[in-house]
Amino acid sequence: MVAENNFFSSAKMVTKTVDLRSDTVTKPTETMRAAMASAEVDDDVLGNDPTAFRLESEMAKITGKEAALFVPSGTMGNLISVLVHCDIRGSEVILGHNSHIHIYENGGISTIGGVHPRTVRNNKDGTMDLDSIEAAIRDPRGELVYPTTRLICLENSHANCGGRCLTAEYTDRVGEIAKEHGLKLHIDGARIFNASVALGVPVDRLVQAADSVSVCLSKGIGAPVGSVIVGSKSFITKARRLRKTLGGGMRQVGILCAAALVALHENVAKLETDHKRAKILAEGLNQIKGLRVDIDTVETNIIYIHVVEGSNISAEKLLMNLEEHGILMMRESSSSVRIVLHHQISASDVQYTLSCFQRALTGGHDENNGN
Ligand SMILES: Cc1ncc(COP(=O)(O)O)c(C=O)c1O
Ligand SMILES: C[C@@H](O)[C@H](N)C(=O)O
């Protein structure tokens, strides 16, 4: 009977699902599905799929770069970019110790590209100290024993630093350091649109100093699949070849690019609302005993929530309790969880989430289910 009671009580608790695991969880909208169904397509390996070409042309214009290339994922976008810049054995890339490329991409730049990572500590705001970057550049006089630095990578907005935004001025300074030392600069711009909206700075200005950028279409702007890398024409020519080598050349890819064009046209404008709702949710969570959120670090759509010492629940248990109410989130550490907002999270979802947190933390009764 207990099992049955548990079943009924847990079944009753899930009144709706609020998926806050990531901004990668969005489902294609009806407009996207209609665009996919009617997309003009052709073989994008033998030539240029016309819809892919439209998307790539638009992304080159938005980012202020000469050319662009659609790729299946942000991970492949970063991998191709690093491997194009570091095409000589013994190359080394300077990147953040907390960067997505270094932590969440299976070390692909090393295992596939033979590129050596040299990490510099990320500050809480996603930057790396300029003097630390410069100090990490290998002295050419040590070429007998050192790898050769060829690339610096930044990430904007910075996912693991809570979606913090790098300013154009900071990026320009890193670009100057790269140029002074004959290096290239790549930006993992998975959420560059979020940074652009949060800072009120156009994307092309934010990435002006970069030789290449990988922009995710499947994150904040809600396309079902894909990323676009941008750079010079010669960079994109090399990237296209490497995409094929890695198995990323797809045929009638316009079906996916059609949805991405809808995302570009319809969802960039929604990012400001995502950021406002993130702020409202962060401020509400910060009022709940047992939780701590550093409100000032919530600049875009990502919130890190710390379960403080002395609270009556662990991060694991909190995730389980919330999941019983249909609230899905990612565990960040033994004492913290992550929330990512997106255009399919409504204002009422934010209020429902806050009420579920309140109940989970205070063991409060669920007024809807009387338990
Ligand atoms: C900052 C950042 N870069 C790159 C990626 C990789 O994108 P994908 O998941 O499409 O491979 C992600 C994933 O969400 C990300 O958050
Ligand atoms: C988990 C990570 O790989 C993914 N990029 C996300 O932010 O959800």
Image (cartoon, rainbow, N blue to C red):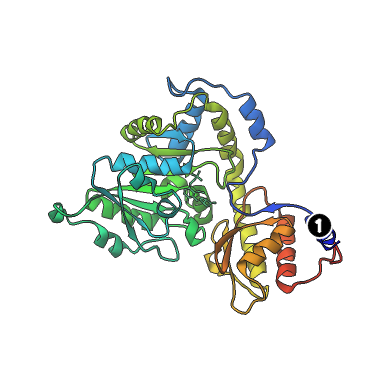
User: In percent of the image, x 13 and y 52: which residue is there?
Assistant: 144
Q: Quadrant of residue 173?
A: bottom left
How far from the left and from the top, in percent, is residue 281? Answer: 65, 63
User: In percent of the image, x 31 and y 62: which residue is there?
Assistant: 130
**Residue at the extreme bottom of the image, as rendered:** 310
Q: Quadrant of residue 285?
A: bottom right
Q: Residues within 10 Å of mark 1 (few under 14, many from 20)?
A: few
Horizontal side, residue 256 vs residue 129: left or right: right
Q: Is residue 66 visible?
A: yes
Q: Is residue 210 visible?
A: no
How far from the left and from the top, in percent, is residue 267? Answer: 60, 43
* 217, above or below 345, in the image: above
User: In percent of the image, x 56 and y 21: which residue is there?
Assistant: 40
Q: In which quadrant is the N terminus drawn?
A: bottom right
Q: Which residue is mark 1?
A: 7
* 129, above or below 221, in the image: below
Say what amino acid the circle numbered 1 marks: Phe
Q: In the structure shown, which secondary structural element does the residue marked by tag 1 occupy?
A: helix
User: In percent of the image, x 66 and y 72: which residue is there?
Assistant: 313
- Disc 1, ligand 2: is the CB inside 8 Å? no
Figure label count: 1
Horizontal side, residue 23 vs residue 1: left or right: left
Report the front residue among 322 and 121: 322
* 210, above or below 50, in the image: below
How far from the left and from the top, in percent, is residue 187? Answer: 39, 48
How far from the left and from the top, in percent, is residue 345? Answer: 68, 51
